[in-house]
Image: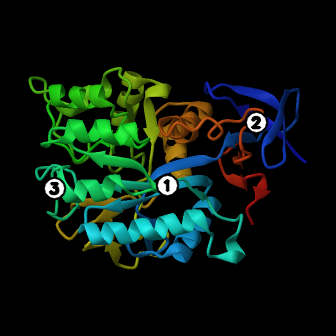
Amino acid sequence: MKTLSGGIVRADGTLIRGQLTFSDRIVEVHPAAVPSRDYLLPGLIDLQVNGSHGIDVMSADASALAALGHHLAREGTTAWLPTAVTSPIERIEGAHAAIAEAIAAPSHPELAGESAVILGMHLEGPFISPHRLGAHPPLNLDPVGDVFERVAAMSALRLITLAPELSGALDAIRRLVARGVTVSIGHTNATLEEARAGIDAGARMFTHLFNAMRPLGHRDPGVIAAALAQSAAIAAVIPDGVHLHPEILRLVYHARGMSGMMLTTDKVALAGAAGAPARAGPARATIDRGAARLGDGTLAGSIISLLDGVRLMVGAAGVTVGQAAVMAATNPANVLGMRDRGRLEAGARADLIVLAPELELKAVFVGGREIS
């Protein structure tokens, strides 16, 4: 049994001073006057990780995914979704097989218990708009036919990004939701009405809001207006100060509030890789002006940790530490329907991080085990 003390973040974003007792799960949260000024946060959960530290999800085997998860854990992320991108279906199936293997049987013994937990696969494409590809290759498809059936059969699929305006998309959303897959609206040219139809069909998230989407117009509000309005779908943002200006992050927060906003990194293999060129999907990308970019300047993902995003939200977007923690831990767990992660309360998994008052990372625990 272990005990930590400090300012404990609750699921409503408030802080209480006290002690946290835990083993592999949290046993007790005890309010008390304690001298520690540290923050105790639920372990961060990143639902969009394409790669990191030179490891690309699309080409990683189960062992490499474990190593990637170890890097994430050392940054404060305790659970994640390896994210596959638009590719030929055979390559997507290969990435899925590696992810499923990594979930079923950890293949990196020396990292057992030392890695962020893989919760499933996020598939970003190929069911996306040809007009909003971003850095994706032009291999986009409508969510119908053989390829869709092969995707829908993937056992580890947990989250999928698609464009709701595509032919067959609304039926695809209903089918995916019925089998427990969370659907996110992204890489889309949807109108306001088409986006709302996607939400009515069961979509519960927007992928990297503002990026690879129909622009917001005062006469053509489009998909972004649907994301900024109160709805059942949570607005995910990339809080690196590049994909979105901090004032836009502040705007999203004021529009949706803490419970309607979520942080993801969309990080790629270049993150933490000492600036060496690496693959971001099928095209070469390099670090340029604070993010990964293709040769023509197109953004191809971020290079931040999720904790970096928490710090930016606190320092530049005007939210509290507790509110940022909810956006980076509680809300991601909620969107996946998980109630024993992303919160510090009795019975929840002991996935947590300790931050100094200046938000420096002091300790990470995954399932109650401290990451070295």
Q: Earlier in the sequence, mark 2 or mark 3?
A: 3
State the image coordinates of residue 159 (x, y, percent, origin top left): 40, 47
Q: Could you tell me the amino acid type at mark 1? A: Gly
- The x, y position of residue 218, in whole percent, is 13, 24
Residue at (40% x, 64% y) in the render: 268
Is residue 289 in view? no
Q: Looking at the image, which residue is at 56% across and 76% down? A: 63
Q: Residue 277 falls in which quadrant of the image?
A: bottom left
Q: Residue at x 42, y 28 (%)?
A: 253
Q: CA distance from mark 3 to mark 1?
A: 23 Å
Q: Which residue is mark 1?
A: 120
Residue behind mark 2: 347
Q: Residue 340 placed where, x, y %?
A: 66, 38
The amino acid beneath tag 3 is: Leu
Residue 86, image x, y percentages: 25, 61
Task: Find the distance from the CA under tag 1 to the CA under tag 2.
Answer: 22 Å
Give the position of the C terminus as an image quadrant: bottom right
Which element type, helix, strand or loop, lies under badge 3? loop
In the image, residue 319 sits, relative to residue 186, either above or below, namely: above
Image side of residue 350 versus residue 276, left or right: right
Q: Quick check: 231 above or below 153?
A: above
Residue under circle 3?
A: 141
